[in-house]
Amino acid sequence: MGMMAVHNAKSLQTFTSRRFLWFLGFRRMSDKADLSLNGGLIEGVWIFARHGDRTPSRSLCAPHRKEEEASFWKKKLPPPDPLTALEKLSVYFPPNIHESNGRNFVDVSRSPFGFLTKIGIDQLSTNGRRFFLRYDNHGHRCPTTGRPDPDSFLHSWYVRAYSTNYLRTILSVQCFLDGLLSTRCYNPMSSLLPDDPLSDVYFQNSKPYLDIRVRERATDNLNAFDRNPKLIETLVTEVASTEHFLKNDAKACNLAARLANFLPGLVRPGRKTFGGPSGINWVEATDHFVCRSSHGVRFSRFSEFENDDSAEKLLEAMEYRTILHLAWRFRQW
């Protein structure tokens, strides 16, 4: 999660070309915006972040094992299901989605792949709780009551929340706010920290506290890939056709071929590779390692080499190189 403490909205211009998936900003309800006049008190906080822990974006195993893998990842989703979690969190933090985004979330068609997990829910709730304790206990807030509560916090801070039109990102910002304001409208046992003075407190309200805004698709600056996919495709093509990119991506061809031997979904028809001679989608390849590491799952699980310890060791050896190559490709854009 990224955070920047600022007192001038122009600072946000620095971030307009980046790919963030949700954004939260809160400013003090104060006339003293000049840090030279207020003793250095923080006037505003802008948080740019991606979603929490999620399932892999796609199944990369052989077709006859896809249902088995899907059943496994369904058990990692928020219980009883993500839409129920959304419904409960929307009581206090309803999505406010501009009509240009259509009726469906971008990421719901491949369920359970690409969905926020139970781990992700707890990550964001805990982070929200930490932010509350920081901006309450360290004197960055002016409480209006003797006992902190959501209304007091929102009275002291001018809060706005924005997200892209993905179920996992909207749930992520909802869970962050759930922890920040101690509403615990979903999974009330999450976001408890050691020595938390309010660990036994949660608040209820008869109306929403804050909506999650998904802005007009053509002008939203959180995700340039969604805002203008044709432009991004052109830019990616230009970068991927340079001599420097072609030379360095070609060095990963052998690694790509070895990965595809274990993960045949990397070479499926119609896949998006985002250019280069290596010929695979490196985001999906990295997903395979990151998501399994997060949940303690063997890299060879659901492959044709599932019970082969030597294959597992080979995949372990390829993990770092895969992530490293994806990081290099990202830096080229």
Image (cartoon, grey):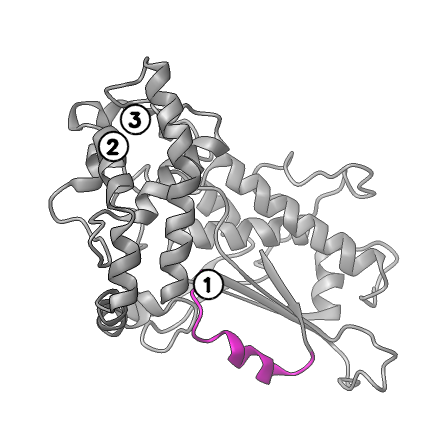
On the image, numbered disc 1 is attached to which residue? 20
Q: Where is 41 relative to 246, above or below?
A: below
Structural distance between the alpha carbons of marks 1 and 3: 29 Å
Residue 221 horizontal side relative to residue 229, left or right: right
- Bounds of the magenta segment: 7-21
Going from N to C along the chain, the mark reached first, 1 or 3, is: 1
Q: Which mark is residue 289?
A: none
Q: Give the percent coordinates (x, y) of residue 55.
A: 39, 38
Under mark 1, the amino acid is Phe
Structural distance between the alpha carbons of marks 3 and 2: 13 Å
On the image, numbered disc 2 is attached to which residue? 263
On the image, numbered disc 3 is attached to which residue? 69
Q: Nearer the viewer, mark 2 or mark 1?
A: 2
Is residue 14 covered in magenta? Answer: yes
- Residue appearing at x 50%, y 35% in the figure: 118
The answer to whether residue 308 shows anywhere in this view is yes
| Quarter of the figure that contains the C terminus | bottom left
| Quarter of the figure that contains the N terminus | bottom right
Going from N to C along the chain, the mark reached first, 3 or 2, is: 3
Q: Quadrant of residue 156?
A: bottom right
Q: Where is 205 relative to 303, above or below?
A: below
Q: Quadrant of residue 314?
A: top left
Q: Give the percent coordinates (x, y) of residue 209.
A: 60, 60
Under mark 3, the amino acid is Glu
